[in-house]
Amino acid sequence: MSVVEIKVPDIGDFDAVEIIEVLVSVGEEIVANQDVITLESDKAAMEIPSSVAGKVVSVNVAVGEKVKEGSVILTLDTEAAASIGDKEQATPVSDKTPESKPKPAEVIAKSAVTIAKGDADIHAEILVLGSGPGGYTAAFRAADLGKQVVMIERHAKIGGVCLNVGCIPSKALLHTAHIINEAADIADHGVKFAQPEIDIRKIESWKTSIVDKLTGGLKALAKQRKVTIIQGEARFAGTHTMQVTTADGEKTISFDNCIIAAGSRVSKVPVFPNDDPRMMDSTDALDLADVPENLLVIGGGIIGLEMATVYDALGSKITVVEMQDGLISGADKDIVKPLLKKIQNKYQAIYLNTKVAKIEPQKKGLKVTFEGKDAPETAVFDKILVAVGRTPNGKLINAELAGVNVDDYGFINVDAQMRTNMPHIFAIGDIVGQPMLAHKATHEAKVAAEVIAGMKSAFDPMTIPSVAYTDPEIAWMGLTEIEAKAQNINYVKGAFPWAASGRSLSVGRDEGLTKALFDKETGRIIGAGIVGPNAGELIGEAVLALEMGADAEDIGMTIHPHPTLSETLCFAAEMAEGSITDLLPPRKTLHSK
């Protein structure tokens, strides 16, 4: 007789899980991978299989008992079995430690019900979870490569957060703010307009029409590509199945490959009175319910400052509070400085190094208690916008039932081909990590679709640009000076102030700056930052220069149209080269000792 013990494998962060069913009995012959007990935690029910075939000699557990990793479930006589399975994970009585442990998500995945293709309501060669920029790009690229694609979206309109409640509607409102501000600024140049009459319902309608046009266009493109769209709330039900709650009831979708593009959601601060209608997140702010007289923006990052720009133009008195010592922490302070200087003169207050300790709802408003050297102890606001970041949705889709590992923050780790730890499941966009940007997601999406289609593809960008659509705009790419210094990189900076730009002066804006960083040894561009009107439109040339390995001479010798804002990158390169004629060349250049 050759007896082995079947033990509870690694079941994740559980140290006492109750047995709700024993599925075998003494004397029964079982096959490899046959389930022997069922466990139930507060998160899921899971079957634990035997790793080998054999005849049950003893059952060491009972219903109601609690077990943990390493607990002996039963013993098997492997010689008595007619067919003996793989012994890889079996533990002989004499052994103390198993050779390897399956990962927690993979263990939970074994408990999922396996549904054959023919038993599912729909089968997809590629199932895409989410229809944001990453999701629809993945779906469309896969369809173009000949794959049969199903795309799931929980909202009524495809397009995800970006098109519906993010990038696109916010830019529409920022354009409105830009026009209002320009009309006011032109008074200094001899053209004075009357105060604008603001109809927020009409503004809201215009914003919605833009969203409808884009989402409608995507729907038409999906139809032309024969991509099936399912509307509903989806969660994994197994390694190759997904359960979708739709208006018509539950649907089961089986798939050969899956691309997770489930995005992120606004982060909430638990101690804040989030149920109070006067508390807003970015989605609420885009709805334009009203224009509060006094608005507090918690968070001095891109989203908070963009919405502050909108509400300031519409007439709100803005206060910004930020825990760190500067605004837009990812950018160098010299390209944030012009924005800070401008809004300090416009907003009620900007409190840096300041924490919101408490928010108390009152009849007259929301009473805020601050902790910071320059902030008042308390102040009352009509509304508060909380813009403290976004949280990935990795923990909301039952990824563990598919065997996909999700970290404590909700992110899913992937390789350069966008594969998760399960080789047939891919993930893209916000859910795989920073930066949470739509233009990152779209490129990741194409990689995932192409890899599934058998192409050689990888996500390996040299940089991912960032843009704050504030007034003035801020954009940067590659290394910042902070990062270059931290990495001890010997670099030369070429900085061109827009006060010396004819085009900038002609539009009444002289606060801008274009700077570029070049490797001292090779002369190649390694980073760039721009602040000023249309900075987001200008940064693309710097990104291309970095990807193409351009050096300062390449950029400086490229003939740019004059007078334009685009030539400021050329002038920044000439500053680093020492060949600038529009200003005096700096002492430190790429050619100086």
Image: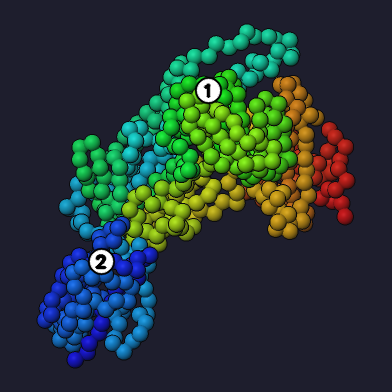
Residue 166 in view: no
SS at circle 1: loop
Quarter of the picture containing the N terminus is bottom left
Quarter of the picture containing the C terminus is bottom right
Q: Which mark is residue 292?
A: 1
Residue 441 locus on image (x, y percent): 48, 45
Residue 524 locus on image (x, y percent): 72, 51
Drawn side of residue 19 relative to residue 286, left or right: left
- Residue 343 picture quarter: top right
Q: On screen, 26 above or below 149?
A: below
Question: Would you name the residue on which mark 2 appears?
Answer: 18
Tell me what residue is drawn at x 48 percent, y 39 percent: 272
Kindly identify the amino acid type of the residue bearing the numbered disc 1: Pro
- Residue 46 picture quarter: bottom left
Marks 2 and 1 sit apart, C-alpha to C-alpha, by 53 Å
SS at circle 2: strand
Drawn side of residue 202 relative to residue 309, left or right: left
Tell me what residue is drawn at x 47 percent, y 25 percent: 363
- Residue 48 picture quarter: bottom left
